Image (tube, rainbow, N blue to C red):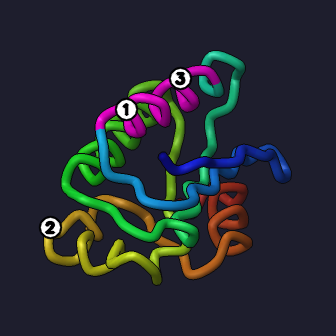
Amino acid sequence: MPGWTVRTQEGVSIISLDGAFANYDQVKSLWETLVSLLSSGHKQFVLDLSGISFMNSTSLGGLVSAYTKVRAAGGKLVLTGMNKGGVRDLLEITKLRTVFDVFDSESEAVAALQSGAA
């Protein structure tokens, strides 16, 4: 099961995933983390996928659901670190790259959220 760390930088919650992200229990745990953060008043999220070694359609669906949950709560969720584990290819093939705001670095993602560009 992948782990993740959550930290806050300049008002933006950064969730860094690590390992294989490929089953429903992992997706559910991520949702619960986001719901907890949302209920604590957090509204801006960077999901750092640079530590992901593998992702499948279940986890991809989980990302879409997480994006939807955050948006429904008036927040924003952006992605970064998609160079490993075929994540970038998976988003391109499924055309979901057009749904998510994707940034090359965490610092760019945080800056875009803070400026309202994301």
Q: Secondary structure at mark 1?
A: helix
Q: Secondary structure at mark 2?
A: loop
Q: What residue is at 72 percent from the left and 56 percent from the top?
A: 114
Q: What residue is at 48 percent from the left and 30 percent from the top?
A: 29
| Residues marked 3 and 2 touching at CB (< 8 Å) | no
Q: Pick whichever, 6 or 3, lies toward us.
A: 3
Q: CA distance from mark 3 to mark 1?
A: 15 Å
Q: CA distance from mark 2 to mark 1?
A: 22 Å
User: Residue 34 appears at what percent x and percent y?
Assistant: 55, 31
Q: Which residue is mark 3?
A: 35
Q: Secondary structure at mark 3?
A: helix
User: Residue 5 appears at what percent x and percent y?
Assistant: 70, 47
Q: Pick whichever, 33 or 52, lies toward us.
A: 52
53 falls in the magenta region: no
Query: Which segment is the magenta one?
Result: 24-36
Amino acid under label 2?
Thr
**Badge 2: residue crowd in 10 Å (few <14, some 14–19, many ≥20):** few
Residue 87 to residue 29: above or below: below
Q: Which residue is mark 2?
A: 94
Mark toward the start of the polypeptide (3 vs 2): 3
Q: What residue is at 33 percent from the left and 78 percent from the top?
A: 86
Residue lying at the far front of the rendered structure: 1
Mark toward the start of the polypeptide (3 vs 1): 1
Residue 107 marker = none
Residue 25 marker = 1
> Which dot, 3 or 1, sits closer to the camera?
1
User: Residue 21 appears at what percent x and percent y?
Assistant: 40, 54
| Residues marked 2 and 1 touching at CB (< 8 Å) | no
